[in-house]
Image (cartoon, rainbow, N blue to C red):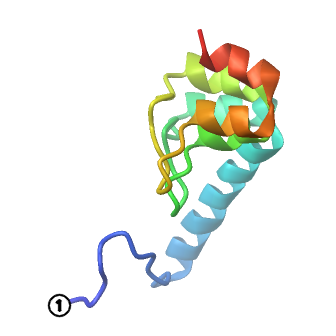
Amino acid sequence: MSEHKPGQPQQPQNQLDEDAIAFAQGIFELARNGGTNMLRPMLEAGVPVNMRTSSGESLLMLAASNGHADTVQLLLEKGANPELQDTDGNTALSLARATGAQDAIKHLER
């Protein structure tokens, strides 16, 4: 039986795991850096719009906290859940407010 505890990241067991982790990290970076044009086809191809980091940050939270209004709009159009909370209880809207991302806030308050 594994000694792994729920919610605790595990080390990759093989190259496929490492590749999947690298792919996910790339998706998170696109949201964090406002890569709307690159993110769109990935979401349309089936990347989960509500995927999260190990600390519970959703793509929407990453985009909102970094002030990327176009990415926030795309994620909302694709069905991102604005009510998700990270491990600290933050939502995309609370993170956008904390960073003063006014354009992202406008999309989230609709």
49 left or right, relative to 1:
right
Q: Amino acid at mark 1?
A: Met
Q: Nearer the viewer, residue 56 or 38?
A: 56
Residue 83 falls in which quadrant of the image?
A: top left
Would you place residue 52 above or below residue 107 in this image?
below
The residue lying toward the viewer, choosing from 7 and 48, is 7
Residue 68: percent from the left, percent from the top? 80, 31
In the displayed structure image, the side of residue 43 where residue 62 appears, left or right: right
Residue 86 in view in this figure: yes
Position of the C terminus by quadrant: top right
The residue that disc 1 covers is 1
Question: Alpha-carbon neighbours of circle 1 within 10 Å: few (<14), some, or many (≥20)?
Answer: few
Residue located at (49% from left, 84% from top): 11
106 on left or right of 52: right
Picture layout, residue 86 above or below residue 107: below
Q: Residue at x 30, y 80 (%)?
A: 5
The percent position of residue 91, horizontal first and vertical second, equals 54, 38
Label 1 residue SS: loop
**42 lies left or right of 34:** left
At x 56%, y 79%, the residue is 15
Residue 62 to residue 39: above or below: below
